[in-house]
């Protein structure tokens, strides 16, 4: 089991922050590109090697993301329409992941197509900025789970922006 921590900056136009391991050491870096429409970001390791790139597709009813891994693999992250919970389906080249969470966007579980839990995401309730803990139960999915947390954070930001505008 491995834990990673994501903590956004308080004042931001784009996200640029380290992703920390369970000992508080920097493990990865998130860099978001500035765009007027959509969302683009990348995650790199400590050697500045890009391990994944994320882009949100435009003109979709619900948020949909393409995550390209550094080794050539890719995944599609698609939010699903649900009333009293949060659900996201992830299509991998030869696998699938399913994220389900509560309506308050605080606790999420991630399972694979065999129903095994591969990760969990917990959002801190009392924090000035979005702060997530990713618990990785199956380290074979670590890159996919990192990408999924970043997509999830953007989905929640979009939903909160839409709710505050209405």
Image (tube, rainbow, N blue to C red):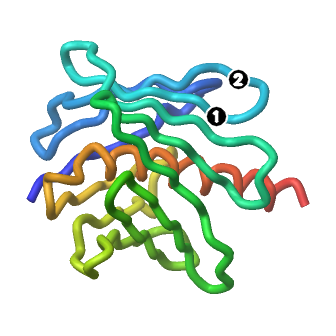
Residue at image position (59%, 25%) is 14
| SS assignment at label 1 | loop
Name the residue at the top extreme: 48
Given residues 139 and 25, the one toward you in this image is 139
Residue at image position (53%, 33%) is 10
Q: Which numbered circle lies on residue 56?
A: none
Task: Say few, some or many: other residues with alpha carbon within 10 Å of mark 1 (under 14 / 14 to 19 / 20 or more).
Answer: some
Residue 91 position by quadrant = bottom left
**Place of residue 99 in the rendered image (x, y in percent of width and height, measured from the top left):** 43, 69
**Place of residue 70 in the rendered image (x, y in percent of width and height, measured from the top left):** 32, 28
Given residues 90 and 121, the one toward you in this image is 90
Q: Which numbered circle lies on residue 39?
A: 1
**Place of residue 44 in the rendered image (x, y in percent of width and height, measured from the top left):** 31, 23
Residue at image position (57%, 46%) is 65
**Place of residue 134 in the rendered image (x, y in percent of width and height, measured from the top left):** 28, 55
What is the quadrant of the N terminus in the image?
bottom left
Task: Say few, some or many: other residues with alpha carbon within 10 Å of mark 2 (under 14 / 14 to 19 / 20 or more).
Answer: few
Looking at the image, residue 8 sits to the left or right of residue 6; the answer is right
Residue that numbered label 2 is attached to: 35
């Amino acid at each position: 089991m491995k834990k990673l921590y994501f903590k956004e900056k308080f004042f931001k136009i784009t996200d640029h922050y380290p992703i920390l391991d369970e000992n508080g050491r920097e493990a990865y870096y998130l860099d978001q590109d500035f765009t007027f429409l959509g969302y683009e970001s990348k995650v790199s390791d400590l050697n500045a090697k890009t391990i994944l790139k994320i882009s949100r597709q435009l003109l979709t009813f619900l948020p949909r993301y393409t995550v390209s891994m550094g080794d050539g693999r890719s995944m599609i992250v698609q939010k699903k329409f649900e009333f009293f919970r949060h659900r996201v389906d992830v299509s991998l080249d030869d696998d699938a992941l399913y994220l389900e969470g509560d309506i308050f966007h605080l606790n999420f579980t991630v399972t694979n197509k065999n129903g095994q839990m591969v990760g969990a995401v917990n959002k801190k309730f009392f924090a000035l900025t979005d702060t997530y803990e990713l618990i990785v139960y199956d380290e074979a999915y670590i890159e996919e789970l990192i990408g999924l947390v970043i997509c999830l954070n953007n989905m929640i930001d979009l939903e909160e922006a839409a709710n505050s505008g209405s």
